[in-house]
Image (tube, grey):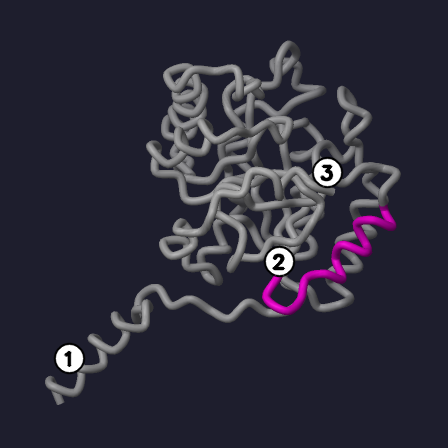
Amino acid sequence: MKQHFFYLLVSLQIFGCSSENQINDIPDKLVVLTFDDAPASQYSVVAPLLKEFGFGATFYVCEFPPNYRDSTLYMNWRQIHALEKMGFEIANHTRSHAKITELSQTEFNAELEYIDFKCDSLGIPISKNFAYPGYRLNAEILEYLKEKNYRMARAGGSRPYDPLKDHPYLIPSWATDENNKSEIMDALQKAKDGKIVVLTLHGVPDIEHPWVNTPPELFREYLQYLADNDYTVISMRDLEKYVDFEEAMKLEKDLSKPLKN
C-alpha cells in the first residue's frame, strides 16, 4: 500500500500537478471581473451587487491624486478593508496611479510597496497581482514585476486571454464604458475553447472620470446576463485554479498584443 502511494505521488509530480494544487480544465463562459482606481461607487454600488449575484472580483486599488481623500469620490482604506472582508481580492494599482513607464525601478518599487504596506497594516492579504495604470507598459516594467515575484498582471487589448499564448504579465482585458455595451456583450461570447474574458471596470458610476463611467443600471444588466446564462465569474486570483502560472511564465513576452484592439 505504501509503495502504491509513493508511485502515485511520483506520477502526479511528473505530470505537473499535485493533490494539493490541481489545475482544472478551463470551462466555457469563464469571466474575470476587475475594478480599477478605488472610486467610492465600488463600495456603495458594485460590492452589494456582486454579493447579490454571488460573483467574485478583484479590486485594483490606488490613492488617485489629487482627490483621493474625498470620500464622495474615492474609497477610504476602511472601505477597502471591508471589501476584503466580503471575500473580494484587493490588488495593487500603485500608490498614485503612476505613469510607471517614467519611473526608475526604485520609484516603481516604492509605489508597489506603499499599497502592500497599507494592506499589511490592515490585515489584508498582500496580492502578487498587478494592473497597469492607464495600460502603460514596457519591457523594463515586466522585469521589475519579475524581481518582485509577481504572479500576474492585467493589461488592456480588448481580446480574450489565452493562457497557452499570453504571458501572465500581459493578461488582456476589455474596458467598459457607458457607450460600448454591444462590444462587451460580443466579448462575453468569446469566453470559450480555453479562452477567458477579463473585464476592466472603473466607477459605477465614475464621477471624476466620465470617459470610463459604467452606469449602475448597465452594470446590473451585465451581471444579470452573466447569471442568466450560467457564466462562472471569478477574481484574478481564482485563475490559479485554471492556469499553471509556473509554466506560463516561460511564454514569450509579446508587448504588442495586449495593446491591440
Q: Which mark is residue 45?
A: 3
Residue 15 sits above or below residue 34 on the image? below
Question: How far apart in space, not on screen, are marks 1 and 3 (Cα)?
Answer: 52 Å
Residue 39 in percent (x, y) is at 67, 27
The residue drawn where x is 35% and y is 64% is: 21
Question: How far apart in space, not on screen, are marks 2 and 1 (Cα)?
Answer: 36 Å
Q: Which span is picked out in magenta?
A: 181-196
Number of the front mark, 3 or 2: 2
Residue 101 in percent (x, y) is at 53, 21
The reply to whether callout 2 and callout 1 are in contact (CB within 8 Å) is: no
The residue drawn where x is 11% and y is 86% is: 3
Mark 1 = which residue? 6
Q: In the figure, residue 69 lies in which quadrant?
A: top right
| Quarter of the rendering occupied by the N terminus | bottom left
Residue 175 in percent (x, y) is at 72, 40
Callout 3: SS:
helix
Nearer-the-camera pick, 39 or 109: 109
Q: Which mark is residue 196?
A: 2
Callout 2 amino acid: Ile
Q: In the figure, residue 114 lies in which quadrant?
A: top left
Nearer-the-camera pick, 20 or 252: 252
Callout 1: SS:
helix
Examine the structure image and report whether residue 192 is included in the region drawn in magenta.
Answer: yes
